[in-house]
Amino acid sequence: MTANIPPLLVVDDEKNMRLSLAAVMEGEGYEYRAADSAEDALKLLEQEQFFMVITDARLGGMSGYEFLGHVRTRWPNLPILMITAYATPKLAVEAIKAGAIDYLAKPFAPEELLHAVSRCAERYRLLMENAALRARAGEAYRIEQLIGESDKVRELKDFIRTVAPTHATVLILGESGTGKELVAGALHSLSQRSEKNYVRINCAAIPENLLESELFGHEKGAFTGALRQKHGRVEEADGGTIFLDEIGDMSRSLQAKLLRFLEDGTFTRVGGNQELRVNVRLIAATNRDVIEAIRQNQFREDLFHRLNVVQFLPPPLRERGNDIILLAEHFLKHFDRACNKHIKSISKIAQQQLLQHHWPGNVRELRNVIERAVILEKSDEIQAASLPEFHLESRLRKVAIPTHLACDRSLDESLTNFERDLITSILNLNHFSLNKTAEHLKLSRHALRYRMQRLNIGSDTTMDEDAGQQDGKDMG
Ligand SMILES: Nc1ncnc2c1ncn2[C@@H]1O[C@H](COP(=O)(O)OP(=O)(O)OP(=O)(O)O)[C@@H](O)[C@H]1O
Ligand SMILES: [Mg+2]
């Protein structure tokens, strides 16, 4: 009955009282610690976890009421039972007002005490269970947490509000760090399912062979290590929402099972043959190029169409204009508080740099950049020097440009050279057939001829037979 709960703490300056309380607790199997003063009790509370405190109202040194006040502020959820000398309504009211969960008047029967303690133990268990459930189910993001006022983000939020109350399956695509998880959470929070569980599974984080049992559960003995039956997370999400993150990483065989689940809500646990059914809304996300994955046979096209009932595409950060600054200021506040600094703003030059950067890692990258800047910054304003050297990183992204095209030429000149080189090599490839070359470059023959003239190509090349005939048509 008392397994898995931490000890309780008894505070009393009378030794006899401590001993008799201890005897009662021990008899019931509660673990306990005793302190003879409030001061000692506070020290113990710092060192160890307790599920409740029993204290006498009158203590040498700090009084029981004062002690109660300290505990209330420092450990607001810790229940305290106060023992008062006589049962006067005034004292009882005082004890409760000061934050005691209950009080007992001396003398009291051991049963009365045990009754109060067991209620606290029960409360402790419930609290723990709820916390565990919440941690498992995960709190979903709310739409207010999605920061941004640019047109694209306003449109995104409007779309979330429109789609959230429906039962539509949703697919969220887009670059890494654009806020796909945030969109998924906001969809759940704004739906009629918001009171039910929001279950998030990261398909890339769970080993392939375990993902199926995580999703759909397993029967006892389904595989080595399956010591007992396990419910699937889809069951946990019944009535609510399941968010399958990084769905692009799911194996093809599991994709087939997911497809069936999406068709009619049915599934079977691994190693089981009973068909089960739940009512779950599915939201999936991936930063992979799904179309490419379909082409490469890694992602089932039928599943894609089934998921893609409504598609969200949170825009890349570089397309959100001044939202970059709004987000930067938001993260600044957050990290400033967390790091206990007093940085108020971002300098104009630093803002310029933030606005010019390409943000390949999107909002996540911005968050990291601001976190780092807050750590480095010594003044009360983020200076450009506390930002990373963005130009180094943008050089990484640049396509390698053949040197003979790039060196010291104007853009127009470089482009002209590039165009001439490209057309010449495609002509070569197609043995100087204008038809084939035009087709290859997706141009009309006429347009190709025009460009060749402009670029001085072909005056000394002998074109194939088709050239003349076709030219006549084009010109005619
Ligand atoms: N509009 C926004 N407002 C506030 N915070 C945001 C916004 N967009 C993203 N974030 C934050 O940026 C981080 C990355 O967002 P999120 O995890 O949702 O990205 P993602 O699209 O799922 O990326 P990945 O594809 O890499 O998983 C998170 O800390 C998230 O809270
Ligand atoms: Mg994500």
Image (tube, rainbow, N blue to C red):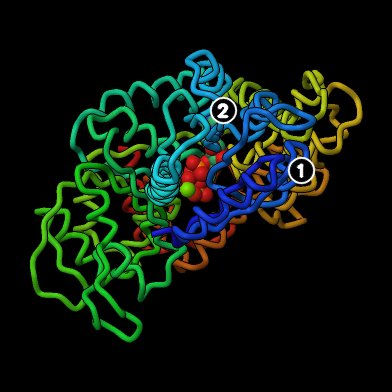
Q: Amino acid at mark 1?
A: Asp
Q: Are marks 2 and 1 in contact (CB under 8 Å)?
A: no
Image position, residue 46 (x, y; %):
72, 45
Quadrant of image for the C terminus: top left
How many labels sit on residues? 2
Furthest-top residue in this view: 90
Quadrant of image for the N terminus: bottom left
Query: Within 10 Å of the Cα at label 1, are there few (<14), some (14-19), or many (20+) other Cα atoms?
Result: few
Image position, residue 302 (x, y; %):
19, 58
Q: Amino acid at mark 2?
A: Thr
Q: Quadrant of residue 42?
A: top right
Residue 154 lies, with reference to residue 217, above or below; the image says above
**Helix, strand or loop under label 1:** helix
Q: Earlier in the sequence, mark 2 or mark 1?
A: 1
Q: Which mark is residue 40?
A: 1
Query: Within 10 Å of the Cα at label 2, are there few (<14), some (14-19), or many (20+) other Cα atoms?
Result: many
Image position, residue 107 (x, y; %):
50, 35
Residue 66 lies, with reference to residue 210, above or below; the image says above
Residue at the spot of label 2? 84
Query: Of discs 2 and 1, which sits in the foreground?
Result: 2
Which of the pair 398/206 is nearer the observer? Answer: 206
Which of the pair 17/307 is nearer the observer? Answer: 17
**Helix, strand or loop under label 2:** strand
